[in-house]
Amino acid sequence: MTVYDGENTGCVQIIDDEHDPIEDIQECIDQAWDLHDWGTDYNIVTIGGPQGSGQSTLLNALFGTKFFIPDDNDDESTTEGVWMSVAPGMNVLAMDAEMVGSSDGVGWKCWLFTTTHKTLLLFAIRDHTGELSQEHLFSELMSSISEAWSNLEKPSGLDMHAACDFFDCEVVTLPSKLNAPDEFDAAVSKLRTRFVDKHSQDYVFKPHYWKLVNADKIAVHFAAILDTISDHWTMLNHKVLSQGPTPQPAKAKKYSDARRSCLFQGQYEEHIRGFYDMATHHAYSAFVQAIGLLRQSTGARIIDEQLALLIRRHYRDAMDTFNAITCQHRHADYGTNRDGLREKCYAAVTSLFPGQLPWDMANVDTQICIERALEQQESLIQERVRRDVKHYLTKMELIISQQATEISTQAAKISEQAAKIKEQKAGMAAQKKTIDRQHATISALDTEISNLEKVIDVQDSNLVTQNEMANGQKDIIKKQKCRINALMAQIAEREAEIAKMGNQVAELSAAMAFIIKAQQMEQSE
């Protein structure tokens, strides 16, 4: 058996630090714990978180386990691989694993083999000071989970499912163990009751968190899952987690073939047996508890007709519970397991009411026979209803098929009309663009004409002004002409006078010349 430091801590390592299953792990578990009587009446709690965040401490505080907690002087500061322990006094297997924050994929692998069925994710917020309310933390957490889920590539058929279809999520807050040890212990004690008190409204282990295999075969189951994950890790890492390189075609085909035949091929029958054991145990436990309380409340030691009716009612409740659990997972062994539950219920009545004479048990036998007859009648009615429903569904499928054909034809016509309408819309859009361009051109021309009209108005105003100025100039010119004519007349008169004076000068010059010539002649004589 593999234990921490060789001490008898009851902790068994099921996956080593190289992420491989421990050899002979089933033998180790058989030696450490006796799980053969557990069947499927057990729960698994796996804790995860960043390395060194106190997962082992919290597990030990909640369940009384003895997982190794290193101190400051230890070379090994974190959990390596996956370790498991039985919680004292509880049908609980506690798992301590290196998960969140690991860089080599072991966290994802541990996560993958815990998500086969709906699981509760209970987030414990450590070192909580109360600055943010628990409701606010839960809202932020769900927002992050929803965003991560929407971005996750999901297998075919799960596209429309939400994260809450596979996981229940809750948040609890814990004070600091170092700064507020008393408050931490009180919070852990309060949280522990949720794992122990089955009558609490906050009881953690709900019936729908059922297991695939019996507890004594859990190690083999984990090893098979881990082998499957390792065998297809390249595809899972790329397709599911969107990490790593594109797988080779051969690995992709192998993964596709495995998915078609179910990744847990060869284990289905074992899982079904475990599932029906769980359903039988759950219904039987409720029945035994109910008739035990009935015996205590009535104090009856002999089963009379009235008590038999009450027992019959609880018996029917047990059968209804069994049916409700198994309704989505019907198998060929359904009838056998239901008969087995019926026999166990009858044996429980015999055990709780010992010493009954044969005729004392007659009432119970009668009521159970009546119940069985009613069940058979109900089965016949259900079978008849199933046949009628099947016939109706076949008829409806034919009608739907015909309607689908008609719808397909109409869809083709609508598609053709839509194409024509689309083409017409395209033509109208082109025409609208042309009209818009023409409107833009006309608008530009209107603007230009308006500007030209303004220029013409200005020019007309200038012409009026120029005409007025021209008329003024004409008056001035006319006056100037009159003055010029007067001056010309004066000039003509002066010219006449000048001409007359010229003649006079000429006559005077001639007279002077004659006088001078006469004087010269006188002098010469």
Image: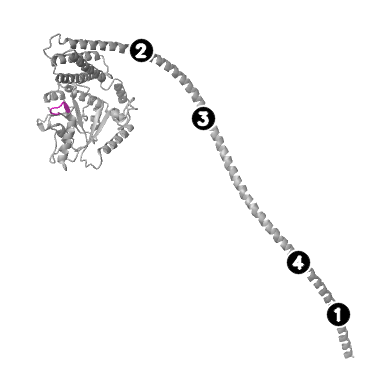
Magenta stretch: includes residue 80: no
- Given contact means CB atoms under 8 Å apart, are the residues at marks 2 and 1 in contact? no
| Foreground disc of the pair 1, 4 | 4
Residue 94 in view:
no
Residue 461 or 346: which is nearer the viewer? 346
* 315 relative to 13, above or below: above
- Mark closer to the chain start, 1 or 4: 4
- Mark closer to the chain start, 2 or 4: 2
Residue 279's image quarter?
top left
Residue labelled with disc 3: 422
The structure residue drawn at horizontal position 22% and vertical position 26%, both measured from the top left corner, is 206
Tell me the SS state at disc 3.
helix
Magenta stretch: includes residue 90: yes
Residue labelled with disc 2: 388
Residue labelled with disc 1: 504
Amino acid identity at mark 1: Gln
Q: Counting other residues with Cα less than 10 Å from the Cα at mark 4, is it few (<14), some (14-19), or many (20 or more)?
A: few
Q: Specify the principal SS of the magenta part.
A: loop
Amino acid identity at mark 4: Lys
Residue labelled with disc 4: 479
Tell me the SS state at disc 2.
helix
CA gap, disc 2 to disc 3? Answer: 47 Å
